[in-house]
Amino acid sequence: MSELTVNNLYLDYGSGASANPILKGVSMQLQRGEVVALLGPSGSGKTTLLRAVAGLESPKAGRINIGERVVFEGTQNGARTLEMPAEQRNLGLVFQSYALWPHKTVADNVGYGLVLRKMNKSEIGERVKKVLGQLGLGHLGERFPHQLSGGQQQRVAIARALVYNPPVILLDEPLSNLDAKLREEARAFLRELIVRLGLSALMVTHDQAEAMAISDRILLLNNGKIEQQGSPQSMYQTPDTLFTAEFMGSNNRLPGKVLQRDGQRVTLQVEGGTVQGFARGGNNGTDVIGIVRLEQVRISDTQSDNAIRLPLSTCMYLGDRWECLFHSGGHDSVGLRAYAAQRLAPGDYWLQLPQDSLWVF
């Protein structure tokens, strides 16, 4: 069953000739027990879509359903036939800033929404105790937000969103305020929590690694439209467009010219030599872009198949590996990066680009 359905949603900022379109006909579904990540660059519309679902932004047209309830409906001429207020949508929302009351204890922060719903005090206490226990915060109920770590504050914000058992929880960049180390730990905690509790969640993030780690499905937005959607594996391994290929993962971009086509096999001229790749995206022209992930490039000091020869420019230590940059040094030349197990000596190297992993757009 679909917990959330968005159909052909439009949203503008401003009006008339000065209107700035943000969402341009977005449609999506969130199934029960599913985690969907809204991924995309700044300005793509992902946070606006989340806020429209929450009732914090007013769309121009389209339809939003939470379960079987219609919470928004409007026509293309801007007439709104239904717009349910945010407080009536019964959605859990975790803000990027956490938005905790500094003068209230953890327990009071978590239970505040239940107080507004005029629930009796004993039931509020039971629900707060249960959700704090689920998130490992049972011993912190009497503390204040300033006495907590960043990770603990994040858990309090999640507990507050979960305490009244909403059908959908909305997460707006939930890990962005944490430092790099804590962010990795919180990512694992959040995924485990979502699976354990069987939550239905819609999460906004600009971090593709975070989206792949936590979500069951990714919606990649580009300029107010869905560029591509699918499982994290399909988005990473089989991108349909150049935008998707470049946004997901760490890549090398190789401008080239097509010399020959044989079905989806393409022979192209790139800086440093001639290589074969796999056509994607439907570009049948002569000028194309080759994309290859850094982890797919193989480095050799002897000539290899489907490889180009470039001099080593520099190596950077990443802890578990080295990232090496190869560059011919010309003014208009394009560098190529690859991973190595150890630091390389100066000199020229052959960089092998597997045919199926060199995508041509």
Image (cartoon, rainbow, N blue to C red):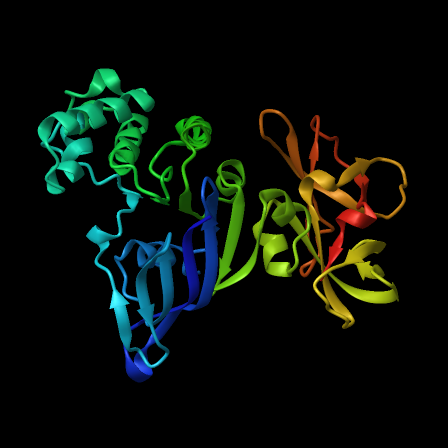
- 323 with respect to 174 (left or right): right
Report the number of numbered marks. 0
Q: What's the residue at 70%, 26% (across, down)?
A: 342
Taking depth in this image into account, of 4 and 358 the one nearest to the observer is 4
Residue 258 lies, in percent from the top left, at 82, 66
Judged left or right of residue 169, residue 330 is right
Q: Position of residue 116 (x, y in %)?
A: 12, 42
Query: Toward the viewer: 66 or 139?
Result: 66
Which residue is at the far top? Answer: 139
Location of residue 190 with respect to 273 vertically, above or below: above
Percent of width and height locating residue 295: 69, 38
- The quarter of the rendered structure image containing the C terminus is bottom right
Residue 249 shows up from this direction: yes
Asked if 93 appears above or below 57 in the picture, the reply is above
Residue 107, quarter of picture? top left
The location of residue 141, given as percent across then percent down, is: 18, 21
Q: Residue furthest bottom?
A: 17
Q: Is residue 154 above or below residue 241?
A: above
- Residue 94 in view in this figure: no
> Is residue 139 toward the left or the right of residue 28 in the image?
left
Q: Residue at x 89, y 37 (%)?
A: 302
